Image (cartoon, coloured by chain):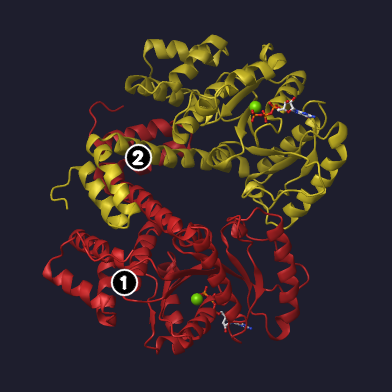
Chain colours: A yellow, B red
Amino acid sequence: MEQTANPISLDTATQRLAEGVLAGRRRALSKAITLVENTREDRRRQANQLVSYLLPRSGTATRIGISGTPGVGKSTFIEAFGLFLIERGLRVAVLAVDPSSKISGGSILGDKVRMEQLARRNEAFIRPSPSAGTLGGVTRRTRETMMLCEAAGFDVILIETVGVGQSETAVADMVDFFTVLLLPNAGDEIQGIKKGIIEVADLLVINKADGEFRDAAKRARRHYANAVNLFRPKNPHWKTPVVCASGLGGEGIDTVWESAGKHRALLEEHGLFEKLRRQQRQRWFQQALEDSLLERFQAHPEVARKLPELRNAIGQGQMSPHHAAANLIGLFMGDPQQN
Amino acid sequence: MEQTANPISLDTATQRLAEGVLAGRRRALSKAITLVENTREDRRRQANQLVSYLLPRSGTATRIGISGTPGVGKSTFIEAFGLFLIERGLRVAVLAVDPSSKISGGSILGDKVRMEQLARRNEAFIRPSPSAGTLGGVTRRTRETMMLCEAAGFDVILIETVGVGQSETAVADMVDFFTVLLLPNAGDEIQGIKKGIIEVADLLVINKADGEFRDAAKRARRHYANAVNLFRPKNPHWKTPVVCASGLGGEGIDTVWESAGKHRALLEEHGLFEKLRRQQRQRWFQQALEDSLLERFQAHPEVARKLPELRNAIGQGQMSPHHAAANLIGLFMGDPQQN
Ligand SMILES: Nc1nc2c(ncn2[C@@H]2O[C@H](COP(=O)(O)OP(=O)(O)OP(=O)(O)O)[C@@H](O)[C@H]2O)c(=O)[nH]1
Ligand SMILES: Nc1nc2c(ncn2[C@@H]2O[C@H](COP(=O)(O)OP(=O)(O)OP(=O)(O)O)[C@@H](O)[C@H]2O)c(=O)[nH]1
Ligand SMILES: [Mg+2]
Ligand SMILES: [Mg+2]
């Protein structure tokens, strides 16, 4: 997708920012990301211009999602993984999607501290999760940040996300290779597998496979490998591997990277990589449309005033949900004659 | 939810229709469903009034979804199931969700023919899938039809849906008990399980467990029971049973009905049944809002004209998806200054 002719013309300030990003200057990149995170109308417009301008210069990095329950060792794993990639001459950006961060608090600082070594490297760029908002807002900003990092020349983008509900799916949708970290349960009794994990994972990693957990990890590995076998793979050419690793001990990191490489080669071999990128862009477009429409709708003063009353009536079974919806949409669209 | 005071006043024609439905008159019910299927603006308004008026008289029937791949025997099973229920003094409505019916064709007629015996019974009401449209449109009409059937006094609503993608999820969302029919694979090699099935099913039925398939069905039953064990249940109080049945031979039908009864009793015991109904109504409201918003958006002439061009630019990577979305939303909302 490297193109020389770019149909978008920017104002001077945005042009300078774009050039700074393309030159790989960290301050410009940080500033561009801050712009993308700004929700003010005019800033949004400028950010849209910037991202559109830089888009043809992105899309070639390897995008890897790292998911898993809180405390499974994602940040520790990412730090080890990042250092491993830098040793191989690669530049690494680390992003996070955590729509709950405002509520749970502290995880931003926590990650900075935990990725201490990686944070000191020039070849790495760590950006904490954007301050909370709707999931739609957070994923939009993460995607755009990813684009900016790619335009700034980062070769690998690692995205950390807590393996809970929709944020996980959102990240799985935006990366090329989605890794789920799992805990080796200490006892013989292994918990049921979280819904949907096997559907989205390109790789399952039993993490903390070290010290006293080593044997439990091996058992968990067999258990999950069995579960994977019961399901149709997401991609008919790829059977989700299940591997053991230890982020803390630096074990199994190479296997994960190798696996990501094989997966990418396979996608390219079958002409699926460009297809994936196109699909991602179209999906983002659709989601962006739906998110912005709903945002505009919910921000409408009359809609906002009427909504709680209708929700209440619906909860009590006093009004048809479709009737109530037609009512609100009519208000929003300024239709005449409402009832 | 039986209420005497109804805050909605209807015009004379709609009032007469409502009374016909409440009296359980088939012609009135058919007419009401046809009204609900009509997409004309003024008809939609009338339908919304009617459904809102009847809503307090619905919500007590047992809603059962029957899903599975084409040819697994859903219609045959439903016919046997329906006759079984009628023998127990119950009135049964059969609906179908099949957004593809216009394309595949013929399935409406096919179902009518296949449910020949059931169709002749006074205690049964069979309504084929509404003529194709968007999934959103089809599910809205199915939900409203379900409400109407409940208001007309049907005790059990059976909804047939092909187990493919989103229509399955839509039906799982609208029923109390979601049953998935599976084939006993003839060979020893049992195919991988379709993604997501275990997440949505309240009951798995190995169908066609008759004749030469009997043993294969038993093997399949063990296989699926094992798979179910690997996953956390959808409801912590309910472990999805896996049973064998034969719609054709009328075997296992009683087990399925018993299972649905146990499930309902369990929900009620834990106070979850009213909660489920409330959740369903709120979810329908949210979906109705999103569907109608998108419908209005896509029907906007300038949006419709610009959309293909933007999709193309996005596919080629020439424009940021979010930028394009902002553009279109601006057009739709009549914002000044677009770029
Ligand atoms: N034994 C062992 N402990 C580990 C390993 N990786 C992380 N830990 C420990 O597990 C705890 C959580 O590690 P994190 O890396 O912060 O986990 P996380 O998944 O990023 O947690 P959240 O960001 O809060 O969701 C810390 O106390 C780590 O020291 C590992 O490979 N082996
Ligand atoms: N052996 C056996 N055959 C069955 C059984 N049930 C249905 N069949 C046969 O399987 C074929 C498909 O049955 P249907 O009931 O139309 O299946 P369906 O799932 O409704 O199919 P679609 O509506 O097209 O998705 C027919 O030829 C039936 O006679 C059964 O219990 N045992
Ligand atoms: Mg972390
Ligand atoms: Mg059928």
* Image coords of residue A165 (percent x, y): 56, 42
| Closest to the observer, B30 or B133 | B30
Image quadrant in which the N terminus of chain A is located: top right
For the residue marked with disc 1, what is the amino acid?
Ala
Q: Which residue is mark 1?
A: B151
Question: Can you say whether A26 is above or below B72 in the image?
Answer: above
Above-or-below relation of B221 to A236: below
How far from the left and from the top, in percent, is residue A45? 35, 23
Residue displayed at 21% across by 44% down:
A331
Q: Secondary structure at mark 2?
A: helix
Q: Position of residue B134 (x, y in %)?
A: 38, 58
Q: Quadrant of residue B241?
A: bottom right
Q: Residue A251 or A62: which is nearer the viewer?
A: A251
Q: What is the crowding at mark 2: few (fewer than 14 residues within 10 Å), some, or many (at least 20)?
A: some
Type of the residue with mark 2: Leu
Q: Secondary structure at mark 1?
A: helix
> Toward the viewer: A109 or A21?
A109
Q: CA distance from mark 2 to mark 1?
A: 33 Å
- Dot 1 crowding, Cα within 10 Å, few <14, some 14–19, many 20+: many
Chain on which label 2 sits = A
Q: Is residue A176 left or right of residue A132?
A: right
Q: Chain of mark 1?
A: B
| Mark whose residue sits in front, 2 or 1 | 1
Does the beta carbon at disc 2 come under 8 Å from ligand 1? no
Label at residue A298: none
- The residue at the point 31 percent across, 27 percent down is B339
| Residue that carries the numbered disc 2 in the rendered image | A294
Residue A338 in the image, given as x and y percentages of width and height: 16, 50
Above or below, comparing residue A142 to residue A238 in the picture: above
Relative to A232, say whether B261 is above or below. below
Lateral position of residue A54 relative to residue B252, left or right = left
Res A57 visible = no
